[in-house]
Image: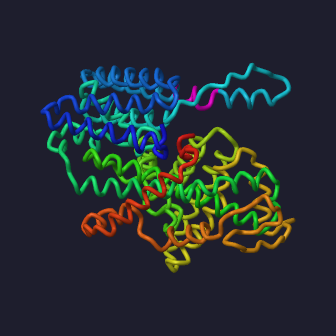
Amino acid sequence: MLFNSLEFLFVFLPIVFVIYFLLVKFNLIKFTNLWLLIASLYFYAYYKIDYFPIIITSLLFNYTCGYFISRQTNNKIKKLILVFTVLGNLALLSYYKYFSQIIDVLNNFSFVHFDTMKLLLPLGISFFTFQQIGYITDLYRGEAKHTNIIDYSLFVSFFPQLISGPICTYKELVPQLQDNSRKKINTDNINAGLFLITIGLFEKVILADNFNAFISNAVEYNVLNEFFTSWIWAFAIAFRGYFDFSGYCDMALGIGKLFNINLPINFDSPYKSIDISDFWRRWHITMGRFLKYNVYIPMGGSRRGELRTYWNLFFVFTITGLWHGATMPCILYGVINGFFVCINKLWKKTQIMMNKKLAIFITFMSLVFISPLIAIRDISHFVISVKTMLGINANFVPVHIQNFDFVFALPNLSLNALLFAASFIIVFCFKNANELAPEYVRANSPKLATLIALLFVYSAFSITQGSQFIYFNF
């Protein structure tokens, strides 16, 4: 089930909300977490029932291992269980995410051939696996407690954050789930939640999804050798990725708010970043935090000398690229970001201050330049686009604006120019939804509420065919 679907917005979510607070009303608070767990597992299984045994197996495996870690007093045995659990999680993730791709790579060599086995990529497997690894390591360090099976399972599978994050820690989520004082109607939270859901839905349906056809058609029609078309294509990919993930994050936080659960902010206007390091502190914030505490710091972080620090940073970003997919474009995306972060760290040592607007511009343009790597499968498309954007062997076919559309040399290729211009304005001139939500609640304005309601209705009924959020694939 997708957040951007009519069955979720008008059937699933209202039913879950109403029954949850009816349980509270009739003094059945002890069943509220069980109800949310049942709803979350149904939400997961609804998308594809074949995925259901995988998440159940993962939940039981980690819960059992967590039990033994919490009961173990021998530190060596405790550490052994931790290593076994982490490796088990990584093995499950690697098998489903990379095995088929590795077989395809091996089959490209003429001297070897294996029967291709296309495995299902379970929805959200990266996120519920990483969340459980984080829990297990926190449990080992004494920063989490081994709770009952219902609360643990809900912590992992809570449907607003199950598919694409945020990746929550035990301390962020479990105490809220167990706090009965939160289990009451809170009109401020409901207003904030509906505002965030509306803005997120608008970002996904009206903004992000309307870039899809142009992005795919530009590749299909082989026009990436046209200078202006190639640049518009790269900007379109950057904006689609921005609004797609921002839309998901806003909706996730908004849905959590309806149940008085404050999920961690996972997206904070990343295209306003002053450098690439700042970007990665604003984009998928909880993923960066997970990699910092579970990869970067265990590798030594910045404690083992300058050269080792740069290597650790570069390695973490290479892993980030591999996490996006075991394809050359994704790996190259991670490598380039690792290189950028290291260069940025060296630049800071010079203590040369750059104008803030110029810094934002350079950072944004760097991101636009490499953004196609996440959207393509064939590295040759990226090479062509880069050469074209640099003016190398490029065809300078003019692009006109007519009837609010870009007019390209190829009649079948089209992109709404107003959408393109509005994307710049929204990204760089507006506050993000997390900043606006408290202001909206404080205003308590019927006119604003009516406007948000109309925007929700317009966005909801603009859903023609629910498209996946991009991070569903990771």
Is any part of residue 338 visible from this angle?
no
Nearest the eye: 287 or 189: 189
Answer left or right for 89 relative to 210. left
Coloring basis for residues: rainbow
What kind of secondary structure does the magenta stretch mostly adopt? helix
Nearest the eye: 342 or 383: 383
Q: Does the magenta stretch include residue 133?
A: no
Up-down relation of residue 193 to residue 39 (above or below): below
Up-down relation of residue 395 to residue 324 (above or below): below
Please report the residue visible at 72 percent of the width from the left and 69 percent of the height from the top.
Answer: 406
> Where residue 72 sits: x, y (%)?
26, 21
Where residue 114 sits, quadrant-wise, is top right
> Where residue 431 sits: x, y (%)?
41, 69
Where residue 234 sits, quadrant-wise, is bottom right
Where residue 79 sits, quadrant-wise, is top left
Residue at far left of view: 27
Q: Looking at the figure, which quarter contains the C terminus?
A: top right
How many discs mark residues in the rendered view?
Answer: 0
> Where residue 163 sits: x, y (%)?
46, 39
Is any part of residue 275 visible from this angle?
yes
Magenta span of residues: 92-99
Please report the residue visible at 15 percent of the width from the left and 38 percent of the height from the top.
Answer: 25
> Where residue 428 sits: x, y (%)?
50, 71
Answer left or right for 164 relative to 418. left
Up-down relation of residue 3 to residue 431 (above or below): above
Please report the residue visible at 50 percent of the width from the left and 58 percent of the height from the top.
Answer: 203
Please report the residue visible at 18 percent of the width from the left and 40 percent of the height from the top.
Answer: 179
